Amino acid sequence: MSKGSFTALTVATDDLDGPFESMSTAGADVVQEPIDQDDGVRDCAFRDPAGNLLRINQR
């Protein structure tokens, strides 16, 4: 698989702020800081070193 060709991975959690703080403090590439979406989902997004998108959702 070529670098960045895996489009996205989404994971769900009961606590978005904890993982966001841990990953951003560790130097992760933040794409989107935590935000409350219109559909009731709170989410954020990062890029991994290969350029893939990781999205974390909280409901």
Image (tube, grey):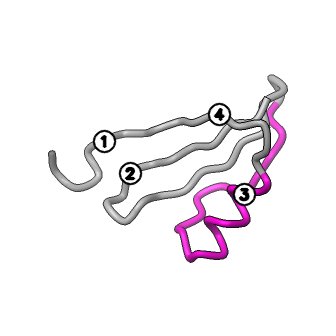
Q: Is label 4 in a helix, a strand or a loop?
A: strand
Compare marks 4 and 2 and give the one earlier in the sequence: 4
Mark 4 vs mark 2, foreground winner is 4
Q: Which mark is residue 52?
A: 2
Residue at numbered disc 1:
6
Mark 4 neighbour class, 10 Å CA radius: few under 14, some 14 to 19, many 20 or more: some
Task: Name the kind of residue labelled 1 in the image.
Answer: Phe
- The CA span between labels 1 and 3 is 21 Å
Q: Which residue shows up at 46% across the image and 48% down it?
A: 53
List x then y, in percent, for residue 46.
55, 56
Q: Which mark is residue 18?
A: none
Mark 2 neighbour class, 10 Å CA radius: few under 14, some 14 to 19, many 20 or more: some
Residue at numbered disc 3:
33
- The CA span between labels 2 and 3 is 17 Å
List x then y, in percent, for residue 19.
68, 56
Nearer to me, 7 or 23: 23
